[in-house]
């Protein structure tokens, strides 16, 4: 069904679907990015504290003062979700007790270089890792500080679920409002349709032009067409009336009218039982103002005008002898297209 209301509803539905998809995807991305930035900042602060606890011993080996007050206790609790690891060139890594016996696979970084990674940690934890390259006691050192972000991912999933529910509810409300607005906007079309029914019944002659400007040109054009059709109908009636009047004036007692429509043309034949005309006079009948009997008052239009009207319908008039003995006039009107 070719419905403007349905087109508008489908268009809004598609627009809302695209907007909802962008909002849901963008919302999750933005929230995840903000949370990651917050966690990375916290890891950087912990890294600064950890760097102060690492120093070379008398043998030149890098060691860590695990009793330093600046080291958060969560790094001493096994599988706590908070971990660090120092990778020192040509030496065993220094790891937090929380890592237990697992070693993080982190790349060696140049001095001043930093990276943010996502790695698998102990107990299938998902770790967000901040890595930085430093020079300690003349030795290149890479520090990695990590945090389990599984709980954060769960919070993001909860937020995403709530956001999705909110978007769906908002979308349904917007669709309902849109339906009401569209119906209210298209209400003037109902008035136009009612005018068309009154026009069909003959109660009015033209459509009311007190309509929105968007459909006013259509109503203007429709009324113009009504005027043209009315004028054409009036001319057709005059032409047919003129032919019938001509037949009645010349008929002795009888006039016959036959209408034969087909797919393309409408053929109207009028015959009378009058005196008829000669073959030479038939050609002159279509000349404007010509009548066979100048003493009998004519209809006013003349057969020539009737012929002109027929040609407006891509047809014409044909004259011949009637089976009743008088004149036969056949009007052919094109009705296709």
Image: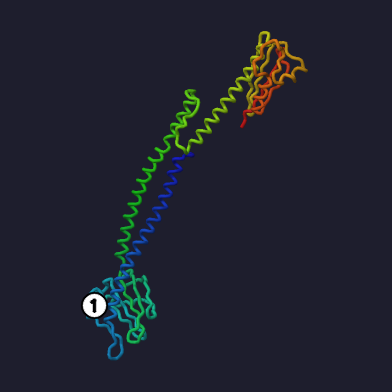
The image position of residue 279, as x and y in percent, is 77, 17
Q: Quadrant of residue 320?
A: top right
- Residue appearing at x 24%, y 81% in the figure: 66
Asked whether 293 or 273 is in front, the reply is 293
Q: Residue at x 38, y 59 (%)?
A: 26
Q: Which residue is mark 1?
A: 70
Residue 223 x, y percent position in the rendering:
52, 30
Find residue 250 and report its image quarter: top right
Residue 335 spot, x, y in % from top left: 62, 28
Q: Residue furthest top?
A: 253
Depth order, front residue of 167/180: 180
How was the colour assigned to the protein in this rendering?
Answer: rainbow
> Within 10 angstroms of label 1, few (less than 14), some, or many (20 or more) residues?
some
Residue 22 occupies quadrant: bottom left
Q: Is residue 179 left or right of residue 269?
A: left
Please tell me which residue is depicted at 59% across the width and 25% down the height of the picture.
Answer: 232
């Amino acid at each position: 069904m070719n419905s403007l209301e349905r087109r508008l509803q489908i268009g809004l539905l598609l627009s809302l679907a695209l907007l909802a998809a962008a909002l849901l995807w963008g919302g999750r991305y933005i929230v995840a990015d903000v949370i990651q930035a917050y966690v990375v900042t916290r890891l950087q602060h912990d890294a600064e504290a950890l760097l102060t606890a690492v120093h070379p011993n008398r043998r030149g080996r890098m060691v860590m003062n695990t009793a330093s007050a600046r080291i958060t206790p969560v790094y001493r609790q096994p599988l706590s979700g908070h971990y660090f690891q120092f990778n020192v060139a040509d030496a065993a890594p220094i790891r937090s007790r929380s890592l237990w016996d697992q070693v993080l696979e982190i790349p060696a970084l140049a001095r001043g270089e930093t990276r943010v990674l996502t790695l698998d940690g102990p107990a299938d934890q998902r770790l967000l890792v901040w890595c930085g390259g430093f020079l300690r006691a003349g030795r290149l050192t890479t520090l990695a500080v990590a945090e389990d972000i599984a709980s954060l991912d769960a919070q993001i999933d909860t937020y995403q679920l709530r956001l999705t529910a909110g978007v769906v509810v908002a979308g349904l409300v917007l669709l309902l409002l849109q339906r009401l607005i569209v119906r209210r906007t298209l209400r003037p079309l109902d008035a136009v349709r009612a005018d068309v029914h009154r026009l069909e019944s003959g109660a009015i002659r033209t459509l009311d032009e007190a309509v929105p400007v968007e459909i006013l040109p259509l109503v203007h054009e429709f009324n113009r067409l009504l005027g043209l059709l009315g004028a054409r109908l009036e001319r057709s009636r005059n032409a047919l009336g003129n032919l019938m009047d001509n037949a009645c004036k010349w008929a002795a007692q009888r006039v016959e009218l036959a209408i034969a429509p087909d797919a393309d043309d409408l053929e109207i034949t009028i015959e009378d039982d009058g005196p008829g005309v000669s073959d030479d006079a038939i050609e002159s009948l279509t000349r404007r103002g010509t009548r066979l009997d100048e003493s009998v008052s004519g209809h006013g239009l003349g057969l020539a005008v009737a012929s002109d009207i027929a040609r407006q319908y891509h047809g014409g008039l044909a004259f011949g002898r009637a089976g009743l003995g008088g004149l036969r006039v056949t009007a052919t009107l094109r009705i296709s297209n």
